[in-house]
Image (tube, rainbow, N blue to C red):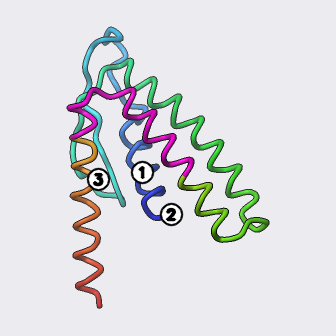
Amino acid sequence: MRTIILLFALITMMIGPVRAQSLPSNGKDPAWVMINDSIVGVLVLTVDQHERLERMEKHYQKDYDKLLAVQDTLTEEQMKSGMHALSANRQKEIKAIMTPKQFDQWIALLKRQEDADARNAALKK
């Protein structure tokens, strides 16, 4: 579940509302990637990619909210399965929108943050 929320935070920040409105759809614009309120990197995406990711994220958020709305009626395994399915579909859509290089950079940013979170958690023990 933590990974799902991290992914949501990442995409939400990556597709933020601030972007050059004068760029053509194939123009490139930096997207700041934030996880846990920290900037962890930058991806350069086209305006079209920003818009597609934004639409995808709005769709995902609706599905996520629907799942959370019925959370109390589901077993832990059903909830976990539902979250996994949403995450897998979302990941597939993100991969289809980004170039292979962008996707690899994005995965590397996620991995780096997960490793940092694990180190910080170990230090707190």
Residues at discs 3 and 2 in contact (Cβ within 8 Å): no
Label 3 amino acid? Leu
| Percent of width and height locating residue 17 | 43, 32
Q: Residue furthest top?
A: 24
Q: Which mark is residue 1?
A: 2
N-terminal-most mark, 3 or 1: 1
Q: Secondary structure at mark 1?
A: helix
Q: Which residue is mark 1?
A: 7
Q: Where 19 falls versus 1 (above or below)?
A: above
Mark 1: amino acid: Leu
In the image, what residue occupies the spot 35% across and 11% down?
25
Q: Residue sitting at 60 percent across and 35 percent down?
A: 59
Label 2 CA crowd tier, 10 Å (few <14, some 14–19, many 20+): few
The structure residue drawn at horizontal position 23% and vertical position 29%, both measured from the top left corner, is 44
Q: CA distance from mark 3 to mark 1?
A: 8 Å
Q: How packed is label 3: few (under 14 Cα within 10 Å), some, or many (20 or more)?
A: many
SS category of the residue bearing label 3: helix
Q: Which residue is mark 3?
A: 110
Nearest to N terminus: mark 2 or mark 1: 2
In the image, which residues are magenta?
85-104
Image quarter of residue 82: bottom right
